[in-house]
Amino acid sequence: MSRKKFQRAYWITVLLLLSSFIFPVFELANKPYPIIMGLPFSFFWVCLWTFIIFIAVIIFHFIDPDNKREE
């Protein structure tokens, strides 16, 4: 994968995932009930998407063409 394609895929993925925090997508989760793992649903939504973004960034770190070790 070329550097330009990698950067484009990275930014598109991160921006799509971050859209879960803004209106109108967040309005789907802006509820106090149900309680999931002791958290109101809206707080669980934010924690869930933060974790998903974290995992996506780690995956992109490992497939980054500039991160390859030269042997």
Image: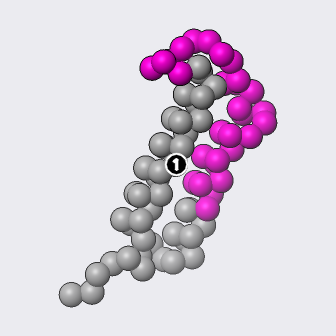
In the rendered image, the quadrant that contains the N terminus is bottom left
Residue at the (65%, 39%) spot, across then down: 20
Identify the residue under disc 1. Answer: 53
Q: How many marks?
A: 1
Q: Position of residue 41 (x, y in %)?
A: 59, 21
Which stretch is magenta?
11-39
Residue 64 figure quarter = bottom left
Asked whether, in this view, residue 28 is left or right of residue 41, the answer is right
The residue at the point 45 percent across, 20 percent down is 37
The correct choice, above or below, for 66 with respect to 40 in the image is below
Q: Is residue 41 above or below residue 47?
A: above
Residue 21 in the image: state x and y as whole percent: 68, 40
Q: SS of the residue at dot 1?
A: helix
Residue 52, compared with residue 57, is above or below; it is above
**42 horizontally vs 63: left or right:** right
Is disc 1 surrounded by few (<14), some (14 to 19) or many (20+) residues within 10 Å? some
The one nearer the camera, 45 or 19, is 45
Outermost top residue = 34
Q: Position of residue 61 (x, y in %)?
A: 41, 65
Residue 12, quarter of the rendered image: bottom right
Membership of 37 in magenta stretch: yes
* Kind of residue at disc 1: Ile
Q: Is residue 9 magenta?
A: no
Q: Tell which residue pokes out farthest to the bottom in this image.
A: 71
- For the point 59% across and 35% down, the residue is 46
Q: How is the image coloured?
A: one colour
- Name the residue at the front extreme: 38
Q: Residue at x 21, y 87 (%)?
A: 71
Percent position (x, y) of residue 3?
Answer: 51, 77
